Amino acid sequence: MEMDITTLRIAATLVSFVTFIGILAWAYSRRRAVAFEEAARLPFEQD
């Protein structure tokens, strides 16, 4: 099988898309909600 530039571009696009979907799934995971809520309140906490 010959790999040309188009095949490499398609593979890079697919890998990027899968990575993006993985980041979205991680960011909106219910397991991470508590940690993200705590991080969101950090600027408002006083020393």
Image (tube, grey):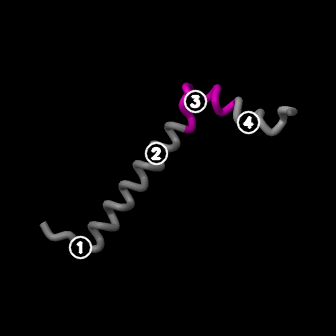
Q: How far is mark 4 from mark 2, CA to CA?
A: 23 Å
Q: Please tell me how crowded label 1 is: few (under 14), some (14-19), or many (20+) other residues with Cα within 10 Å.
A: few
Q: Residue at x 64, y 29 (%)?
A: 35
- Look at mark 2 in the image and give the residue it sits on: 21
Q: How far is mark 3 from mark 2, CA to CA?
A: 16 Å
Q: Residue 4 carries which label?
A: 1
State whether the magenta stretch is mostly helix, strand or loop.
helix
Left or right placement of residue 17 versus residue 44 in this view: left
**Quarter of the image that includes the C terminus:** top right
Q: In which quarter of the image is residue 2?
A: bottom left
Q: How far is mark 3 from mark 4, CA to CA?
A: 12 Å
SS at circle 2 = helix
- Residue at the extreme bottom of the image, as rendered: 5
Q: Residue at x 36, y 61 (%)?
A: 12
- Look at mark 4 in the image and give the residue it sits on: 40
Q: Is residue 34 magenta?
A: yes
